[in-house]
Amino acid sequence: MPYQFIIADKHGKVGLITLNRPQQLNALCDALIDELGAALAAFEADETVGSMVITGSPKAFAAGADITAMKDWSYMDVYQPDYLGPNWARIRNCRKPVIAAVAGYALGGGCELAMSCDMIFAADTAKFGQPEIKLGVLPGAGGTQRLPRAIGKAKAMDMCLTARMMDAKEAEQAGLVARVIAADQLIEETLAAAETIAGYSLPVIMMIKEAINRAYEMPLGEGLLYERRVFQAAFALADRKEGMAAFVEKRQPAFKNR
């Protein structure tokens, strides 16, 4: 389908979504998030796609929400439609892995969008921040919840209460970012990693993603039990038989996603 605020392409087994509001530094409006959710859903339904990447421009992944559109809203304007609710949940609810490839600014909603993905690959030019306090408001799409889980309470307090930005090196050291990559190689390396993921058994990919996400939702004992049960369930997969047979026979496995 045609999109106004994003560009969606396929690269092998990877779905690539590029935020495309360059004049607004990819500021996030509801229509953009709706289109993002629709593109992710399309890639989820595509059996030839095994993973997805979300990226922006070299200057900005997304420089925050569209403040021009928001400045005159009332409480009921955001409460009644549950702003930042259902359409943002589509990102979190993806079963296939989603990587954020971040260059330039990822501020406010942009930082929260990146954190909604399963991992962040950052260009060495990336800057992360939650500057909502400067606008007389607080983060509303995960900045006070995902950020402490990623980097700890102290650094999350620092970022949210002072509005300071964190560069890519510090973000990697703090645990927010999985990899820091030279800016001119960001998309190439991120697509290569996504293609590697997509080359494995899709049922196992989804099991691993779900199990790791459960680690943030349940006590350790329950998490270990869940992991063990999913591990045992993997023995019902044809891909498990193929993977182990290929290892014994010293050849590359041919996974069929079943």
Image (cartoon, rainbow, N blue to C red):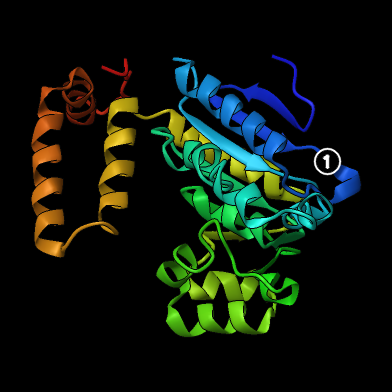
- For the question of whether residue 201 can be seen, the reply is no
Q: Please state which of residues 257 and 138 is positioned toward the viewer in this rendering.
A: 138
Dividing the picture into quadrants, the one containing residue 30 is: top right
Q: Is residue 44 left or right of residue 7?
A: left
**Residue at 23% in and 22% down:** 239
Q: Hey, what amino acid is under mark 1? A: Arg
- Where is residue 114? Give x, y as percent: 58, 53
Is the C terminus in the top left, top right, bottom left or bottom right quadrant? top left
Note whether 134 is above or below 50 in the view shown.
Answer: below
- Where is residue 12? Give x, y as percent: 58, 21
Q: How many marks?
A: 1
- For the question of whether residue 255 can be seen, the reply is yes
Q: Is residue 125 left or right of residue 205?
A: right
Q: Is residue 212 left or right of residue 194?
A: left
**Residue at 43% in and 77% down:** 152
Circle 1 is placed at which residue position?
21
- Where is residue 85? Give x, y as percent: 51, 45
Is the N terminus in the top left, top right, bottom left or bottom right quadrant? top right
**Residue at 49% in and 22% down:** 49
Note whether 48 is above or below 187 in the view shown.
Answer: above
